[in-house]
Amino acid sequence: MNTHSDPEPLKIGILGSGSGSNAESILSAVQSGALNAEVVCVLADREEAVILERARKYGVTAQFLSAAPFKTKLDGEGEQAYIDALRSHGANTVVLAGFMRMVKPGLLQAFPNRVLNIHPALLPAFPGLKSWQQAIDYGAKVAGCTVHFVDEGMDTGPIIVQRAIPVLENETPDSLHARIQEQEHPAYVEALQLIASGRIRIEGRRVVLAD
Ligand code: GRF
């Protein structure tokens, strides 16, 4: 029997479009026991996305699901297909890990306060695409990543975890992106473990940690 101190493992469905390094870090944390969760499925909107291979390596169900005809959002029949797949695999938490689409109210309402995203900047600075490039172009001295709950805006939901790093002299977009990604991997696991341990409460915009 589960008690308050022994919560049920999260049932995570991961959505991605690309390389899946964050997905792999989550899969590895689950395997090692660092994260009290089960990854129940990995879904990708691109058939050739490497994230699917990474998931299969861990023995996790990995499926290409078309989100056509839209290119930059998950809406309509595609959205319903994703909701159905997540539900059929028993997901209760949706992790966006390099999923290159805006999610819409249908998915958010199907998993209230249980859709998370990672963004390669210290929000609210530099939302949108190529945030590491935006940080360099702006002349920022600090960069980083943000794990946040997803709401209907673009990179605007309540912040769970942030990690900061300095922008170095002679930094290139590639070097900054790579160093941000090193921070993303533990940050996502940390945020998910906070949720898994039942220690998180959302108060308006603020994510509050219980004792
Ligand atoms: C990450 O940089 C993340 O911040 C952004 O998309 C990228 C995904 O990388 N949302 P990966 O597929 O996890 O390697």
Image (cartoon, rainbow, N blue to C red):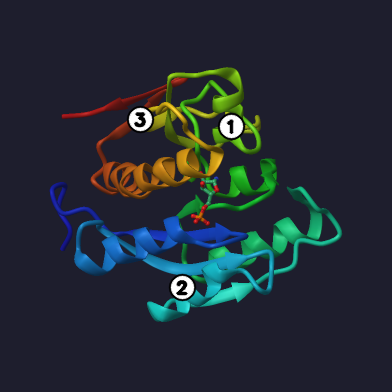
Label 3 is placed on what type of residue?
A: Ile
Q: From what the image shows, is residue 41 above or below residue 67? A: below
Q: Is residue 125 left or right of residue 164?
A: right
Label 1 is placed on what type of residue?
A: Asp
In space, the residues marked 3 and 1 are separated at their CA atoms by 20 Å
State whether residue 56 appears in this view.
yes
Label 2 is placed on what type of residue?
A: Arg
Q: Quadrant of the N terminus?
A: bottom left
Q: Which mark is residue 165?
A: 3
Q: From what the image shows, is residue 47 above or below residue 164? A: below
- Pointer 1 and pointer 2: residues touching (CB < 8 Å)? no
Q: Nearer the viewer, residue 107 or 45?
A: 45
Q: Which mark is residue 54?
A: 2
Number of the front mark, 1 or 2: 2
Q: Is residue 40 left or right of residue 107?
A: left
Q: Is mark 1 within 8 Å of ligand 1?
A: no
Q: Nearer the viewer, residue 67 or 198?
A: 67
Q: Residue at x 82, y 62 (%)?
A: 68
Question: In terms of sequence position, does the residue under pointer 3 or pointer 2 come before the other?
Answer: 2
Q: Which residue is mark 1?
A: 155
Q: Is mark 3 within 8 Å of ligand 1?
A: no
